[in-house]
Image (cartoon, rainbow, N blue to C red):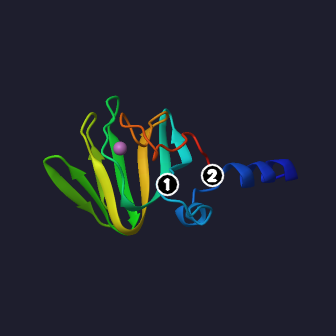
Amino acid sequence: MNLLSFWYFVVMYQPVSFAEKFARFAETFQPKVVAQMNDVQFKLVRVEGDFVWHSHPETDEAFLVIEGMLAIDFRDGRVELQPGELFVVPRGKEHKPFAAGETKILLIEPAGTQNTGDAGGAMTAPMDVWI
Ligand code: NI
């Protein structure tokens, strides 16, 4: 293996470390893109307190809890997610995430999905922020 191919190997085959990525930011409700597969992005986000009621008319939205505990309220019920648990919110379903303490989440959704969906408002975060 010559130096060029060794360097290529080192650069191209790095895993995405959630711990390392989470260490890069502290703000809540500001999703950061860490990977993309076809048109689907993997976003890390810290959640604490109440988010806003919203829906995503164009897409489902997957939540995977990494650390902490996340509740997702619906108009007709609630799901509570522990670390290692996944839930997919159906397209168009109104939902409101909530975490009593700081919680680390992986979101899986198409590129261009706004965090506040059709609600907009002050908690709307910039899209496509890669870390
Ligand atoms: Ni949502």
The outermost residue toward the top is: 58
Residue 48: x, y in percent? 41, 63
Residue 1: x, y in percent? 81, 53
Question: Looking at the image, is mark 1 or mark 2 earlier in the sequence?
Answer: 1
Snapshot quadrant of residue 119? top left
Given the image, on which type of amino acid does mark 1 rest? Leu
Q: Nearer the viewer, residue 42 or 98?
A: 98
Q: Nearer the viewer, residue 94 or 62?
A: 94
Write the residue at 79% across / 53% down.
6
- Asked if residue 80 is positioned above or below residue 129 in the image, the reply reads below
Crowd class of label 2 (few under 14; some 14 to 19; many from 20; radius 10 Å): some
Write the residue at 57% across / 40% down.
128
Element on which disc 1 rests: strand
Q: Is residue 2 left or right of residue 50?
A: right
Write the residue at 63% across / 52% down.
131
Count of residue discs: 2
Q: Nearer the viewer, residue 11 or 27?
A: 27
Residue 109: x, y in percent? 41, 40
The outermost residue toward the front is: 122
Q: Is residue 116 left or right of residue 82?
A: right
Residues at discs 1 and 2 in contact (Cβ within 8 Å)? yes
Write the residue at 48% across / 56% down.
45
- Asked if residue 73 is positioned above or below residue 93 in the image, the reply reads below
Query: What residue does disc 2 label?
Result: 131
Crowd class of label 1 (few under 14; some 14 to 19; many from 20; radius 10 Å): many
The outermost residue toward the right is: 3
Given the image, on which type of amino acid does mark 2 rest? Ile
Ligand 1, image quadrant it occupies: top left
Q: Is residue 91 left or right of residue 33?
A: left
Residue 40: x, y in percent? 46, 37
Return the mark for residue 115: none
Query: What residue does disc 1 label?
Result: 44
